[in-house]
Amino acid sequence: MKKTILTGLRPTGNLHLGHLFGAGQNYVKLQDEYEFFLEIADVQALTDNFDNPEKVRRNVKEITMDLLAIGVDPNKVHLFIQSRIPEIAELTVFYSNLVTVSRLFRNPTVKSEVAQKKELFGKDGESITYGFLGYPVSQAADITIFGGEVVPVGDDQLPLLEQCREIVRKFNNIYGDILKEPEQYLSNAPRLKGLDGNEKMGKSLGNAIFLVDDYETISKKVMGAVTDPNKIKKDDPANPDICMVYYYHKLVTPEDELKAVCSECKNGSRGCVACKKQLIENINKLLDPIKERRKQYEDNPELVDKILEEGTIFARNRAKENMKKIKEAMMIDYE
């Protein structure tokens, strides 16, 4: 029997290169090794987009097409919409009795994200909503309602998984050994930096290349990427290790070309414009097949609907089975 793996993505925008290298390529690998539940986390997206539901609704299908285009196989992965599994919301309510408010405020991931969203939640988080503060509880429900045994996470998300494990241990201590305590699956892919040198490539930071970007858009973004500030003239030697263009070359450029990029940059025989143009071509070589596959789904939206419908039905049935056991353990099985 394959172990069950659960992960999710918030539908707040299209996938970018950071998603592809940080998670997407892993999804394609893991779908052959696990029973894979992949959640389109629209409810979680609403925790900080509650005033823009149209954005979330629109991006449910957008992100689904992105996932299918990078190679997520609907015959191997149960793609489902979070809001269509009411058992998740129900279990979130049950779990909320097991977690203190002070513990949620101490969660390092929550603290970090509140700090990043000062415009929404205020300088000191004084306007933080109940829904956002409690999203680690909802995530615990996401994982456990499907019997999730493995969760792919980055280092920054480990506190969320640990909070889930705490909830599982407390629940099992009170109601019996019902829930599985999930393990982490740490990706060895580093978090991708933005074109501006920011440590994080983000949808809202204006420093990302999206999988759906056309040639002109990619060209404009790459031409504005940060390079070695000490390289003033075309033939000045430069340090590729502090250049975001070389950083991306290492991701998409073949090894033989990469060696030439590095040496020519260091000895001053390569100008930044030529280097950027070569990167633009290599990024497009990577993304063109993805965009071609995506167009098949764009031209057949009913197929995307069918994939989400079938995945959601499967996930709902699994959630119902596990909720029955949970309610029996909690002695609230009145049917």
Image (spheres, rainbow, N blue to C red):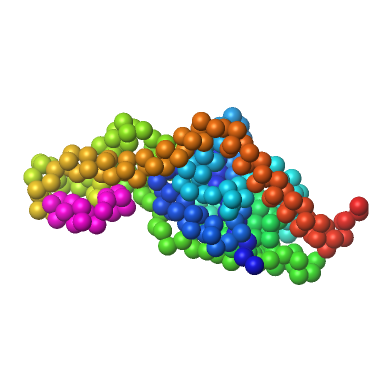
State the residue in front, 266 or 157.
266
Where residue 106 appears, as percent x and y from the top left, is: 58, 57
**What is the number of callouts on the image?**
0
Q: Main secondary structure of the magenta part?
A: helix
102 or 301: which is nearer to us? 301
Report the residue that reaches farthest toward the right: 334
Relative image position of residue 99 (x, y in whole percent): 70, 58
Q: Provide residue 319's location: percent of width, then percent of height.
A: 73, 53
73 or 115: which is nearer to us? Answer: 73
Q: Is residue 142 visible?
A: yes
**The stretch drawn in magenta includes residue 56:** no
Q: Specify whether 172 is left or right of 244.
A: right
What residue is drawn where x is 41% and y is 52%? 21
Q: Quadrant of the N terminus?
A: bottom right
Residue bounds of the magenta highlight? 248-265
Q: Could you say which quadrant of the image residue 262 lies in? A: bottom left
Residue 115 in view: no
Does residue 267 appear to the left or right of 8 in the view shown? Answer: left
Q: Is 29 located above or below residue 56 in the figure?
A: below
